Amino acid sequence: MTNPKNIHLAQFLVHGPTYHSLAMWRHPKTISSGYDWNKPELYQHIAQVCERGLFDTVFFADLNYIADTYKGTMDPALIHATQAPEHDPIPLLSFMAAATKQIGVASTFSVSHSHPFYAARLWATLDHLTKGRAGWNVVTSINSNQAANYGEERQSTDRRYDRAHEFMEVCQKLWHSWDSDAVQMDYKKGVFADPKKVSRIEHRGEFFSSRGPLNVTRSPQNGPAILQAGTSPKGQDFAVKYADAIFAIQPRADDAKAYYDSIKSQMSDIGRDPNTCKILFGIQPILGTSESHAREKQSEHNSLVPLEGGMAILSAHLNFDLSKLPAEAIMSERKEPELYRMRTRFHEADGTPMTVAQTAARHGQSVSLPQFVGTPSRVADQMEQFVDIVGGDGFMLTATHSPGAIEDFVDLVVPELQKRGIYRTEYKGTTQREILNQMD
Ligand SMILES: Cc1cc2nc3c(=O)[nH]c(=O)nc-3n(C[C@H](O)[C@H](O)[C@H](O)COP(=O)(O)O)c2cc1C
């Protein structure tokens, strides 16, 4: 029996030594695996494992900086590998697609530093190369370190999203500049493409001008599937309009439900079917053969995370130097405007407020994604309960070590979810968008 409320799964990745966990690069299981984060074959292997687990997608974050937000120095970022180095994930997408058949391959790509013509061309080409399995996580970028690398001042959130809206509008126009039947390939008449079916776009807006057309033919999904990650009102507005899926970090189920309801009702308000955008909440599963074994693994992992690394990564993500605050200050009581955006990550699961140091430690472990710890069956319980409270749609998984953690989840938790009738047993559909839209 299939369940229309089936869970969707995606795997979070970074093209670097750490994903969300700062322990990852020196976790004993990562070291003993013999794999190296800089070997491209590792990513093909991960894509194959996730496809075996029938995941919707493998999903790369992308940051373009080595942070010096904390204490004004890069040293902690380099010493603790706080999402640094971070190689460009885009070239990996077609490489991973070549080793798989159905799973989506998605990456973050910022709209803050390039022209929409370049992005539209890049993503249409990737959509062709992956046969319609490309997904683009559209972000406006995280901090002033990144802006400085492109010689820019970081704009306000509202301004960045205004620009992002127009960026996407231009991309959409360019993806539509070739009709689906424009390519005729009529060898006898000697006509490759019908000029009447390829149009200029003549866009002139506040931020961009583009004449068009794109010089890439219409791609299988007519541009990639669109993913998004942002929480501000303008960020939500962008997701509601464009996203096929959202990566959300809401550690507590009550906050996740409020966010979920807000997005889905805004979708209804603009006439979009709320099922056409899947909201994937980040979690970090830690599996053991017994509850105590899983707790031991959690302690082993968490003890490998240096507090200074947590301070550095949290400062970078907040774009605020946490060394300015006492380590024992209660995060949720602070009034600094930079802290507001991530306010739902400043409490324990039971609602207890956390100090600066506790929040930084949590951020270094998992970027504040909740740890679901236990036997495979207990982890499946926690997932099921979360989805029951929130109403849907699924999870973005992050690993404590790699390879190893993703394989364990696929081999041990996926069958458990299938047994309960809350997870698919086959893919239906061939494109990234179709798989995200699969309801059973
Ligand atoms: C869950 C999540 C993941 C994100 N991942 C990235 C990323 O990989 N690269 C990036 O440049 N920005 C990333 N961002 C930042 C967004 O681009 C955005 O600029 C920032 O969150 C501010 O928008 P907001 O106030 O709407 O959240 C992420 C944001 C969230 C909430």
Image (cartoon, rainbow, N blue to C red):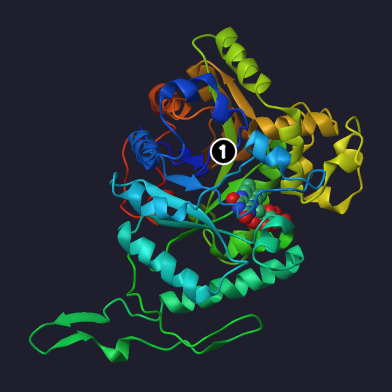
* Count of picture labels: 1
Residue 392 versus residue 55: which sits nearer the camera?
55
Residue 231 visible in the shown view: no
Q: Secondary structure at mark 1?
A: loop
State the residue at coordinates (35%, 47%).
96
Residue 55 visible? The answer is yes
Q: Quadrant of the N terminus?
A: top left
* Residue 204 in the figure: left or right of residue 156: left
Residue 50 occupies quadrant: top left
**Mark 1 residue CB less than 8 A from any atom of ligand 1:** no
Name the amino acid, label 1: Tyr
In the picture shown, does residue 366 fall above or below 96?
Answer: above
User: Which of these two is toward me, 176 or 381?
Assistant: 176
292 vs 218: above or below: above
* Residue at (48% x, 26% y) in the render: 405
* Residue 434 in the image: above or below residue 242: above
Residue 203 percent location from the top left of the image: 54, 86
Query: Looking at the figure, which quarter contains the C terminus?
Result: top left
224 w.r.t. 117: above or below? above
Classify residue 265 by image quadrant: bottom right
Give the residue displayed 40% in from the left and 56% down from the top: 134
- The image shows residue 30 at horizontal and vertical percentages of 49, 25
Residue at numbered disc 1: 19
Q: What x and y, as percent, mark residue 156?
A: 77, 65
Name which residue lies at 73% across and 70% down. 159
Residue neighbourhood size for the residue with mark 1, other residues' Cα within 10 Å, grouped as few (<14), some (14–19), many (≥20): many
Q: Is residue 69 left or right of residue 414?
A: right
Residue 284 versus residue 143: which sits nearer the camera? 143
Q: Residue 255: give x, y in percent of width and height.
A: 72, 40
